């Protein structure tokens, strides 16, 4: 049952927020009625070397398909995130870094110090031969150098591709090769939840499968003794000795690439989502301003990892473009205990916390005591991202974590969208637990049915967007046709999000989850095809099908059906072996939560696997399997139902 409760905008918010209800209506209308004027006006929040004279120039139609924003504008992202703040807030804190262990020592960087660090990093990259347009793979833990590295790339016009430290050597190698990156920036090790992550060793492994790789720049983080390969590996501190701490910023066209970020889709290998310079930065900055109502002096904490888009847009680019103090936490929210996240809030007097429903559910399990042991009185607003937030988690966030005082800003968006698209504005939008509420200015959602018929009013359908916005991805790296086919061919002339959605009678949007073969595990996207191909790569596996299943903490878990080669015996040991295999092939986030040995998979007579049935069985909803008469062998379903597993 949807939660019908309404949480009106608190009067103090309506009065003081950047945008109130009337303001939202005005902005929204203006953004659609006179889009060019609206966006050229908004673009003034950035510092341009040459201000743009044109706003959007895009088409979602096949004949003249293409997306450009502010195409005659020239700017540098690092200047917008650093240099332009120096005169007014050079001595204020730009980055607070809190280490994994509460006993470790944190670090702080003022905007002036950040300028020096980023320039130095940029000069080191240049000295290693990196030039404008080159791809730099960044495989770092959540240490300040991760922020320095991406900003250094932006400063010299190199394109960064950050790979989450939890990905395997295999996955890293694929990402290095896909964008033909010649350099990887890594660290000796990372720390996460009290454990060490052997990043440099993973890069050594990946290098064997990535012939394009020529250089590895290694940041000393834990001080672990790691072997260095002569001619290839360079310690950052050696390369940085004597390097200039000033580096002139490269003037970039608004449409020059800023970064690539790999993300899973329903088919094939991960796609390199490409974001460009001007539109992306404007979107990151503007959405941070609108949704979280950031004000100078506040401490902002996005508890994501830089390896995901959330970290790109809301740890680094959005907040720093807005002159914020952004907190980076190396670790996880519930280690060493369930109080950790709230202790950090108290330690730095955090104003706004932005985290995921998964993190909240893992904390909820531990009860209220670890929360109530802390003050949290600095908090003014709480954000949520990554997956639908169930009303129970929403209420817990609101009532327990926020003591009923802080608006909950549930933000719907995607790697592809660059920043938030559907979310409440705290001074403008009444809240409903579980709903991402309304589209931001410039965002034009529509619900369509499977045939593409537009649904009006209260309805349930597939979520599409009929207009471009500045933060939209521009292409799939190296495969523009795949970009068009993936997002614009299902519904002609519209961007298909891959999400199902309900719109209620008040025009509020309720995202119901992916309708394609993508699983949202702990707010991270996993393509079923990827897990399947990892499984079939195992010598004992003949065939595999992977679907999502409900998971109490992760939102969705991974349920794998595996058919073994003839003569291979199924066993618990083999199940463990296969789970470990997937973990090694892709990374811990891809580890199946349940794995069932299936003598056969339900297929149509033309050989297509009927995933609908597999999903139902995984969900434990075996009473409503629907029509199985088109199956080549209906008997396989009985076996699957009978041998359903829970792990
Ligand atoms: C998918 C995008 C957004 C950055 C982190 C994930 C789901 C994301 C919400 C939300 C319901 C959400 C969607 C979307 N999703 N935020 N607030 N409510 N669903 O980025 O890995 O690109 O995944 O995450 O299904 O399509 P991503």
Image: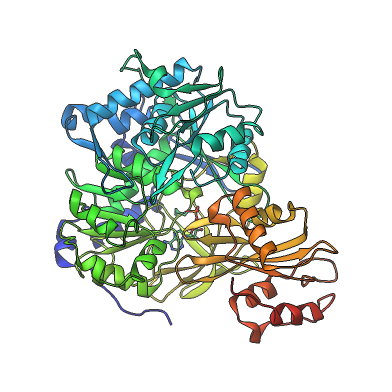
Q: Which image quadrant for residue 478?
A: top right
Residue 93 position, x and y percent, is 20, 37
Q: How is the image coloured?
A: rainbow
Q: Nearer the viewer, residue 535 or 573?
A: 573
Q: Is residue 52 visible?
A: no
Q: Nearer the viewer, residue 38 or 574?
A: 574
Q: Can you say whether 99 is above or below 426 in the image?
A: above
Say left or right for 52 vs 404.
right
Say left or right for 442 vs 231.
left
Q: Can you say whether 319 is above or below 445 in the image?
A: above
Q: Is residue 197 visible?
A: yes
Residue 413 position, x and y percent, is 44, 55
Q: Can you say whether 357 is above or below 229 in the image?
A: below
Q: Residue sitting at 37 percent across and 53 percent down?
A: 332
State which quarter of the image contains the N terminus: bottom left
Residue 339 position, x and y percent, is 27, 61
Residue 121 position, x and y percent, is 38, 24
State which quarter of the image contains the C terminus: bottom right
Q: Can you say whether 104 is above or below 74 in the image?
A: below
Total number of numbered discs in the rendering:
0
Q: Which image quadrant for residue 474?
A: top right
Say left or right for 450 vs 130.
right
Q: Which image quadrant for residue 13?
A: bottom left
Q: Residue furthest bottom?
A: 623
Say left or right for 544 vs 1.
right
Q: Residue sitting at 19 percent across and 65 percent down?
A: 373
Q: Residue sitting at 50 percent across and 63 percent down?
A: 446
């Amino acid at each position: 049952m949807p939660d019908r409760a309404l949480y009106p905008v608190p009067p103090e918010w309506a009065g003081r927020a950047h945008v109130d209800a009337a303001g939202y209506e005005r902005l929204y209308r203006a953004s659609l009625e006179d889009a060019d004027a609206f966006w050229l006006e908004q673009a003034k929040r950035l510092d341009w070397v040459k201000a743009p004279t044109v706003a959007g120039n895009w088409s979602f139609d096949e004949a003249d398909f293409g997306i450009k924003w502010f195409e005659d504008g020239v700017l540098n992202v690092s200047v917008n995130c650093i240099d332009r703040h120096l005169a007014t807030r050079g001595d204020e804190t730009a980055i607070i870094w809190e280490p994994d262990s509460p006993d470790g020592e944190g670090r702080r960087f003022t905007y002036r110090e950040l300028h020096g660090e980023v320039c130095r990093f940029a000069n080191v990259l240049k000295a290693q031969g990196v030039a404008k347009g080159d791809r730099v793979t960044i495989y770092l833990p959540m240490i300040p150098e991760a922020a320095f590295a991406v900003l250094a790339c932006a400063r010299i016009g190199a394109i960064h591709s950050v790979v989450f430290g939890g990905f395997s050597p295999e996955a890293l190698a694929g990402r290095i090769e896909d964008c033909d990156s010649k350099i990887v920036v890594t660290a000796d090790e990372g720390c996460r939840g009290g454990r060490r992550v052997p990043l440099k060793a993973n890069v050594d492994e990946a290098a064997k499968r990535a012939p394009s790789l020529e250089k590895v720049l290694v940041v000393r983080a834990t001080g672990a003794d790691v072997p260095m390969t002569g001619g290839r590996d360079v310690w950052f501190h050696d390369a940085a000795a004597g390097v200039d701490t000033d580096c002139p910023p490269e003037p970039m066209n608004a449409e020059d690439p800023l970064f690539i970020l790999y993300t899973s889709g329903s088919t094939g290998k991960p796609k390199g989502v490409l974001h460009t310079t001007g539109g992306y930065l404007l979107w990151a900055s503007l959405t941070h301003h609108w949704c979280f109502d950031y004000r100078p002096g506040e401490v902002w904490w996005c508890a994501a990892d830089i390896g995901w888009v959330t970290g790109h847009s809301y740890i680094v680019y959005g907040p720093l473009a807005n002159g914020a103090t952004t907190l980076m936490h190396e670790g996880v929210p519930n280690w060493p205990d369930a109080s950790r996240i709230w202790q950090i809030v108290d330690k730095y007097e955090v104003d706004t916390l932005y985290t995921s429903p998964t993190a909240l559910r893992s904390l909820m399990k531990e009860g209220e005591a670890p929360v109530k042991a802390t003050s949290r009185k600095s908090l003014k607003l709480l954000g949520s991202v990554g997956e639908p937030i169930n009303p129970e988690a929403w209420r817990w966030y609101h009532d327990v974590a926020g003591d009923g005082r802080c608006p909950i800003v549930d933000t719907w968006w995607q790697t592809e969208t660059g920043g938030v698209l559907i979310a409440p504005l705290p001074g403008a939008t009444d809240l409903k637990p579980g709903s991402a509420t309304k589209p931001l200015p410039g965002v034009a959602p529509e619900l369509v049915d499977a045939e593409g018929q537009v649904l009006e009013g209260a309805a349930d359908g597939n979520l599409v967007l009929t207009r471009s916005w500045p933060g939209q991805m521009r292409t799939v790296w190296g495969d523009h046709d795949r970009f068009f086919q993936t997002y614009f061919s299902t519904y002609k002339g519209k961007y298909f999000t891959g999400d199902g959605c309900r719109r209620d009678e008040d025009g509020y949007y309720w995202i119901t989850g992916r309708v394609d073969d993508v699983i949202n595990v702990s707010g991270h996207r996993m393509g079923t095809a990827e897990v399947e191909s990892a499984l079939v790569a195992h010598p004992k596996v003949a065939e595999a099908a992977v679907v999502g299943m409900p998971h109490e903490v992760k939102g969705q878990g991974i349920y794998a059906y595996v058919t073994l080669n003839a003569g291979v015996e199924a066993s618990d040991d083999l199940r463990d072996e296969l789970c470990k295999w997937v973990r090694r092939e892709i990374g811990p986030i891809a580890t199946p939560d349940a794995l069932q040995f299936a003598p056969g998979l339900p297929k149509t007579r033309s050989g297509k696997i009927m995933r609908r049935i597999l999903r139902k069985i995984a969900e434990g909803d075996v009473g409503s399997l629907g029509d199985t008469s088109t199956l080549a062998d209906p008997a396989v379903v009985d076996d699957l139902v009978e041998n359903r597993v829970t792990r």
